Amino acid sequence: MDNLDLPGVAEGRILVFCDLENGLGHVNVTQAGMLAIDGGFNLYRFNEAGVGMMTHYSGSKCETMRGCGIGSLSRLVLQRASSVEDAIEILTVYPRCTGINSHVADAKVNRAVVIEANAKETAVRSPFQRDVLWSTNHCNCYPGWMGYQGRNMVEGQMPVYRLKDIGTIKAWQLSLREKGNPNIAASGRFRRYEKLLDENYGSLSLMKGIEILRDRHHPETNELRDWDTPAKARNDGVTISYLLPRKVFSEKALFYKSEDEGPITGQSTNLWSMMATPASGDVHVAVEGLPAHRGAFTSFNFLKELGRLCGANT
């Protein structure tokens, strides 16, 4: 999960196991004090893993304040969805505020979809040719692209990402690669995932997944970026291990509950990473240090952890 490491953010990261009286038990990472979440995994039954999901902001001109926030819908999916179909219904029926790609996978039947949504429309993308599916921060529901047929979600994204031409698949893909465009949310990461998943198809494991999450190779040149070196620009060399130059948001701010004054800065970086094998319940989570996935992944089994919570509540 990439976001700004604003003051207090790194210290507030927590791993949460939820045992609900009315809903599905689930695990997720969030910030202390936040009700909203980005993703996690739930239980179909007490000892059987169900649905995993994660969100990716994907801008659109179709936005409104009269809807549910991204994180609230994510929490609703983990609390209520026991199948991909349940998740699609939740993410389609409830009103939404903005553009979002939700990657949803059902561990029981080994099925996954990406629901691309904005405040007005939704579309569902499925694996193409073989059982591989991935998503990043731009729409891929474009008719004819990777076997997809349905609503063209790129039309609503074009003015926000300032894409030059989406008249054809070729023109759209060339527009996504424009290095001088600061509005595009690092489309090279989509192509890098494609290459890594293709190279490791049939041999993916939890450890290999962690290795992929730590990838820092330029999507076109294959140049290896140092952990502490930011990308040149938002759409040039921003790898799976997202890192952008640090920004100053306030030169002189008065800090809450103190008389200290100083600058407030933030840097887009990885705040947490999670890898899991839902069938076994094994979860590896990185929530310490910055970027989080540079450091150690701590192991849990969320079937056992939720079992302890159930025992404590009886």
Image (cartoon, grey):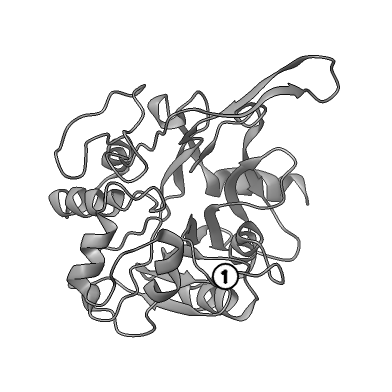
Q: Position of residue 104 (x, y in %)?
A: 45, 65
Q: Image quadrant of residue 157?
A: bottom left
Instruction: Give the farthest residue toward the bottom.
Output: 150
Q: Residue at x 58, y 59 (%)?
A: 46
Q: Position of residue 251 (x, y in %)?
A: 65, 23
Q: Position of residue 200 (x, y in %)?
A: 17, 49
Query: What residue is disc 1 on?
Result: 81
The secondary structure type at the circle numbered 1 is loop
Instruction: Give the farthest residue toward the top.
Output: 260
Name the side, left or right, on which 155 lies relative to 24: left
Task: Answer whether residue 130 is visible to the viewer in this image.
Answer: no
Residue sitting nearer the eye, 137 or 109: 137
Q: Is residue 303 above or below residue 48?
A: above
Kindly identify the amino acid type of the residue bearing the numbered disc 1: Ala
Q: Is residue 134 above or below residue 211?
A: below
Q: Is residue 217 above or below residue 101?
A: above
